[in-house]
Each structure stands twice: as structure tokens, then as C-alpha cells.
Amino acid sequence: MRSKTIRLTAAQAAIIYLQKQFSVMDRQRERLIGGIFGIFGHGNVASISQAIEEYGHDLPYYQPKNEQAMVHAAMGYAKARNRRATLACTASIGPGSTNMVTGAATATVNRIPVLLFASDTFAHRRTGNVLQQLEHPVEGDLSVNDCFRPISRFFDRISRPEQLLTALPEAMRVLTDPADTGAVTISFPQDVEGEAYDYPATFFSERNWIIRRREPSPDDIDEAVTLLAQARAPLIIAGGGVRYSAAEHTLRDFADAFGIPVAETHAGKGVSLEGPYCLGGMGVTGTGAAGRIAEAADVVVAIGTRLQDFQTGSRSAFHNPEARFIAINTSSYDAHKLRGVPVVGDARLALERIRMGLEARHYATPASYRDEIKARSQEWKEAYRTDIAVAPGAPLNQGTIVRIVNEATGAGDIVIAAAGTPPGEIHKGWDASNGSKTFLEFGFSTMGHEIPAAIGARLALPGNSEIFAVIGDGTYLMAPTEIVTAVQESARITIVVIENYGYQCIRDLQENTTGIDNLGNEFRSRDNDALKPNGAYLEVDYAANARSMGATVFSAASEAELKEALAGARRTGGPSVIVVKAEKRGRSIGSGVWWDVGTAEVSGTDTVGAAVAKFRSGVRHQRFLG
């Protein structure tokens, strides 16, 4: 006897299938795909839109204004759901799909699950070459969608409708795999989307995808305990893996029990719950306290982090030549970095096992080290607070703006930042002791991520918490149009636009590495210089622009005005935009951690020669730890 079948188009089958998938972690079950974003064109309008209309009864549809933005929205949704759920995205062939490439790269680099249906040109080829098709002289099956291959954790091109029977389950597996998750791309030829097949009815039964806590090997735990038990000046670097494992309280209790300081990556900002041994951000944009403790650390425990160069100071942050490393990670690849002791497994389980081993050995750091940790932390906080203080009547600097936003937040509120100065100021200055959370996208540092990510987070969390996107005027000019999407969805988000006339974070870096005052980083008119625009600063009416898209708009130039604007935004029922005038070239004190940016080694300009000398002063601390 043949099993029961249902005749559907491939697009219809995909839409029905998505609504039957659930994630389960720690016995908590929720819908894996919470909705679908889509911009339609001739590659997906005839089949996927039809499938959503007829069969998407439990799949809310959202209309973005840019294909890249909808992927960022899916990321914000996934982060707000702690990677247990995400959104699907559909785009037409050609530029519609390739507009999702940056979003896909952002998701994969940050290990955030997103599902992309990138429409493709005809598989049957009867039409000949078609609009938006890439013609390659020696690779007839190549399409623009192949650019998704290196930036997707899973990629499949569906050339026959029955291939969905294997492709979609594999896609769900990757989306729910803590070690291998990221962008999942289904390349969907526009003819195959509409082709029919007799699918087994069982394919559309509800299915649970277990997000498993990987138990670390006892041998790895024993080796980690043995090494850590010898440490006199250990340091924990906590990454996003702590958050995704829901191990925040376990980490704080672990640090308190043994007197081990915790420094946080961008993705891990706030995971130590501001415990007494929290040093704040780690690395280039981190705190001076974390920088100094890292220099002398003899054992570094990296938990749930990829250890990218902003955290390790391009592998120069650890000056102790005897320093050893322990890496706890669900990914074997990341656990084997820095030639240390790999502990492949779930962060919470690994900390619990290591704690048992250290307690059996009655381990604790010396009292003098604990005193140093607290003293350095307090010293840094006082120095930073003093540095970002603004004299009456003076323009606000970005550190002060972040502090004011921080003071306006409470338990459950979320602040999102991704590029330029804001994520750095949040990384080193944000105080999460009030129960607020930070979603810092700094694995790819993508301008334009923040507004759609805030919308995605709001879709995932429709409650009373506040969601803030803190951006510069450069990011605003690059991608403001999702404000319209926020208006459509009555998404209560607050966008804080810091107006400082350009990409001042990079202008500062440019000056420090070349001595150039400004080349292409400030928004200035081309007055009398034919080679570069270095005239008067441009005045852009950001408030009027945001108001034209339907947002409630506030303007501020002082601390009192910003506080009043934040209070007003909290009372609105939809998206608010606060435009804050800021000091053009303000900077706050740094961590003292060096960063390798590749300065020019040969130049006839004295300022470049000085920059090279400064660069070489940091190289001496770099360590090869393959």
C-alpha cells in the first residue's frame, strides 16, 4: 500500500512545512519559524506569494523595504528568542536575492539562524537567457545565488520539487544546531517553485527539533580543572555562547565562588550580570580594567566566543609569556583556538562540571588578586565617568549620550548597536545591573543592521519592554527606510540618531594611523578643493526625514532635552526617532588594547612614519597561537 500523498507546488509545500516545525530546548517548545519577510518580483511573486496567501495561515507575512534589512530583522528576532526561533525571508531573482548577501554574511559570522529563500533563474532553461540571469562562458549552471555558498552554513539549490524532502529537514537541523547555525539558503528556481509533486502527507506532520546541550568530555573537564587550579591570576572572557546557553547566573556564581574576573565580548556584553568580579568589555573597545588584567593573566578561560581580534587585541592583549588558554565552546573549531585546552560542549554544563572539580580541590584566587580586580574596576569606572562628563552648554559626547540612554532603561529593555562609535561606547560603558540587555552586532559590524534588528526584536517580544537602536548619522543615511516598516507594524522602537557629521569613529582611526585630518569620513561640501570635499559641514534635517516616514520625532541637544525625549518616546505607541546633536570629534578614553589595522610601511609623509612607529610598538606583544 502506498502512503497518502498531497499534491502541492514546491512553494506551497515549503510554506506548509515551515508552519509545522518547532524547536525544543530545556523542554520549552516554540514555533521555529515565526513569520516570513518578503519582497516580491518576477522570481517569486507567481508561486511563493501565492503559497503564502493560500496556505500561510500560521505564518505572518511582513513587508520590508530592502532585502538586506529583512535578514537583519530576522537576526533581531532570533536574538530576542535566544536563537530558538527565527524568521524566513524570500526575495526575487537577481538583485533581490543578492541584496540579502550582506545580511547572510552578518548572520553566519555571528552564528545567528536565518532562513533565506533566494529565488533563482529557470531550471528548465526553455526560455533561454532571462532577465537578471548571470551568463558564464564555461559554467552553465552558475547563478548569482552561488555567492551565498561561502557565507551560508547550509546551501541547496532545488532543481526538482521532490528535493525539498531532504533539503528542508537539513535546513531545520542547521538552524537549530548551536555549533553550526547561521544563514541557511535555499536557492529556488522560479519555475521549480510552481512545479507540483505528490508529497507524502507525513512530511507535513509536526516535528520537534531538539536544541541539545552538548555534554563536555570528562577528560576535557579534568584537563581544564587541572590547569585552572594552578592559576593565580585567571581571567574569564565571556561571549555570546553564555547567553545562548542561558548560563548567565551559572557564570556569575562561578566567578563569585572562586574570585575569577569576567570580561565580556560584544556578543557577551551583560552576561556576567554585573557581578562583583565583572570587568566590563574585553579588548579594543573594552575597559581599561579588563585590558590591564588581561595583560598579566596566567590562565584565560574563553567561554562561547570566537576570540576575534577586537577581543584579543589582534592577539596582543595577553603579555604574560606563560599564559595558557581554556576554550569552552559548542564548536570544536572555536574550542581549539589559541592552542589551549579545548572543552567542546555547552557553556552551562561545562561551567557546572569545572566548578565541581575546583571545589573538590578547594580552589580560590588569592585575596590580593581579588582586591586588585575590584580596585581596577572601580578606578576605570571613575575615570570613564569623568572623561565623558560634559560641561554646561557644551555639546554632548557619545559616551554621555549612551550613559543617558542607559539610565533611561530598566529590566527587560534592549539596546541594539552595530557599527561606528555606539557599540564601542556601549561595550565599555553600559551598566546592565538594571536588568537591561545589549544586542551588539560586532562580528560583522554592519551599518544598517540596527533599525531592522530592533523591528525583529519587537516582533519577537511584543510586550512592554523598550527596544532602542542607537546609531550614528552615517548609518541613518545608509538605511533609514525600515522606519516605514516599523510604522506599518506599529512596532514600538526608539531610534537614537547621534548627529556628529560623519563617520567619526573611522575619521579618528584614520588620523591615528595616517595623520590625515579627514579624507572621506565627514559630511562636508566640496567648496574650493577639487580633489576632496573638505568644506563646510552639511546640515541634514534628519528629524524632518524621519517624520516624513511616519515616526514620532524628538530633537535634543542637552542632557535635559535627551532625558525628556526618552521619556516621551516611551509613551508613544509606535516608532520614535530621537535626533541628538553631538560633539563632532569627541572621543572617550580607551582600553589601551592595541589593534592591528595594517598601516603603510613606506611613505614620504612624516605623519605616516610616526603612525608606523606606533604600529610597530604593538606588534611586539602579538603571539602566534595556532
Image (cartoon, grey):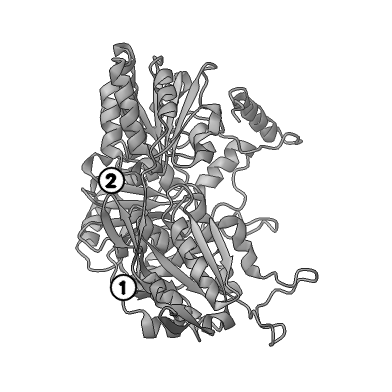
Q: Which residue is at 34% across, 22% downward?
A: 376
Looking at the image, residue 100 sits to the left or right of residue 280; the answer is: right
Residue 489, which numbered label? 1
Whole-percent x, y for residue 564 in the image: 22, 55
**Residue at the disc numbered 2:** 406
Q: How crowded is mark 2: few (under 14 residues within 10 Å), some or many (20 or more)?
A: many
Give the Cα distance between marks 1 and 2.
26 Å
Q: In this view, does 208 lie above or below 307?
A: below
Secondary structure beneath dot 1 equals: loop
Secondary structure beneath dot 2 equals: helix
The quadrant the C terminus occupies is top right
Q: Is residue 502 visible?
A: no
Residue situated in front as seen by the camera: 413 or 379: 413
Q: Which of marks 1 and 2 is nearer the N terminus?
A: 2
Which quadrant of the figure has residue 602? top right
Q: Which amino acid does label 1 sit on?
A: Glu
Looking at the image, residue 514 sits to the left or right of residue 593; the answer is: right
The quadrant the N terminus occupies is bottom left
Q: Is residue 335 above or below residue 109?
A: above
Whole-percent x, y for residue 143 in the image: 67, 70
Q: How crowded is mark 1: few (under 14 residues within 10 Å), some or many (20 or more)?
A: some
Q: Which amino acid does label 2 sit on?
A: Asn
Q: Which residue is at 33% across, 16% downward?
A: 365
